[in-house]
Amino acid sequence: MRPERRRLLAALLLLLPAAAPAAAFDLDALMALLARRSGGEARFTEERFVAGLDGPPLRSRGTLSFTAPDRFARYTTEPRAESMEVQGDIAVLRRGGRTRQVALDALPELGALADAMRGTLTGDARTLQRHFQPGVSGSADKWTLALRPLDAGLAAQVRVLEIAGSGADVRSVEIRLANGDRSLMLVDPLTPAPR
């Protein structure tokens, strides 16, 4: 190829738009996606697997609700009625006609787990990073958020929390405990509330 043609080809290539690199789907991208919601309701089914127990998993079902920035509630209807409502720094637990109110500061492990859910549902990375080392995999269409405890006390109980979803919907929450027990909650969104 003659030098004039090479220079002309090089000049034409400089005028072509450069292909933009694909944006990585990371914690910031996931948090931006999740922050679009201000609340919602969902049905859940949960199976709890107890290490060393050969029988079928323990099953429960009920509903979940969330209202940004800090209200999260779980109402179990089967196998028996019970509930947990977290608002701010207070958790209210109801079971068998009894009600117990607990400050999350008094139970740091419960506070960390509440922050894991609220931080995820509000798209608040700082809340998650207070207690966990977050890792994100996948894409906006199908993602997984793995939360590994930073605190030794929590890590002695919880190995990892894996929250998976699609778009701004959380579809499952798996908790793997240090003793080998685990639970898997499948979530079926009912009424997403866009921001």
Image (cartoon, grey):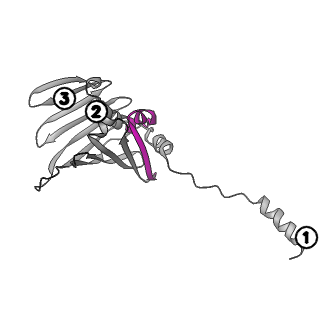
Which label sits in the foreground, 1 or 2? 2
State the separation of the CA atoms marked 1 and 2: 71 Å
Q: Are marks 2 and 3 in contact (CB under 8 Å)?
A: no
The numbered mark, 2 or 3, whose residue comes first in the sequence reads 3
The image shows residue 71 at horizontal and vertical percentages of: 32, 29
Mark number, residue 36: none
Q: Residue at x 82, y 68 (%)?
A: 9
Mark number, residue 4: 1
Q: Name the amino acid, label 2.
A: Glu
Which contiguous range is marked in magenta?
A: 119-140
Which label sits in the foreground, 2 or 3? 2
**Residue for badge 3:** 93
Q: Which quarter of the rendering shows the C terminus?
A: top left
**Residue for badge 2:** 109
Q: Rate crowding at label 2 as few (under 14), some (14 to 19) or many (20 or more) other CA atoms within 10 Å.
A: some
Whether 128 is among the magenta residues is yes
Q: Rate crowding at label 1 as few (under 14), some (14 to 19) or many (20 or more) other CA atoms within 10 Å.
A: few
In the displayed structure, does residue 8 sit left or right of residue 167? Answer: right
Q: Residue at x 29, y 36 (%)?
A: 65
State the separation of the CA atoms marked 1 and 3: 80 Å
